[in-house]
Amino acid sequence: MQSALNKQIAEELGSAYLYQAMSADFAAKNRLGMAAWMQAQAGEEMEHARKIYQYILDRGGRIELMALAAPQQSWESPLAVFKASYKHEQHISACIHDLVKLARELDDTATEVFLAWFVTEQVEEEASVDEVVQKLNQLGDAPHALYMLDKELGARQA
Ligand code: FEO
């Protein structure tokens, strides 16, 4: 369980790394609201990593930090970014569900209960990214509408 949780820390830090790269790509393309949204998302992922880190320590376990691969640096459109983010969140949800299965197999009730927060969080994460994907699908390439959506997304609180 400890090894699987350490791997999940790397998954969460990798998510932060990916979203920071998406934020940087938006900033380079002057989509500053979307850059801020992704920056807030990266911050949330750091929090997820810290939660698991603290849990391992609270259980008297050992932390093992792993190498992170360089994320993709550039995407062709805001829709491509948010679609990639949605796909990534589905991957993270699957990781969390595998962790729950493992905790059950090991009869590790404390870890199963700890992971319940992440199960709920993943439902929210997928829904919030999918909402942006659906909006972008409706807007198409309309510059004014994209400008307004960029402003709206920039209002997100970290
Ligand atoms: Fe920590 Fe977005 O999953």
Image (cartoon, rainbow, N blue to C red):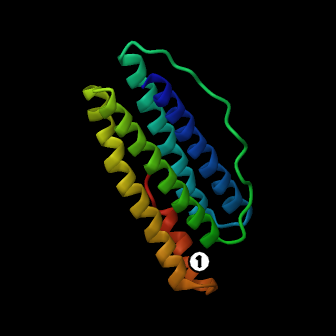
Determine the residue positioned at 74% across, 54% down.
73
Tell me the kind of residue under disc 1.
Tyr
Q: Residue drawn at (48%, 70%), measured in percent from left and top?
A: 132
Q: From this viewpoint, which residue is outermost toward the front?
A: 105
Comparing 75 with 112, the one in front is: 112
**Secondary structure of residue under mark 1:** helix
Of 57 and 30, which appears nearest the observer?
A: 57
At 57% across and 46% down in the image, what residue appears? 15
Q: Is residue 47 left or right of residue 113?
A: right
Could you say where residue 19 lies in the image, as x and y percent from the top left?
60, 51
Give percent across and percent down for residue 140. 59, 85
Examine the image and state in which quarter residue 27 appears: bottom right
Q: Is mark 1 within 8 Å of ligand 1?
A: no
Residue located farthest toward the top when viewing the structure as drawn: 60
Residue 56 placement, left or right of 12: left
18 or 37: which is nearer to us?
Answer: 18
* Residue corresponding to mark 1: 147
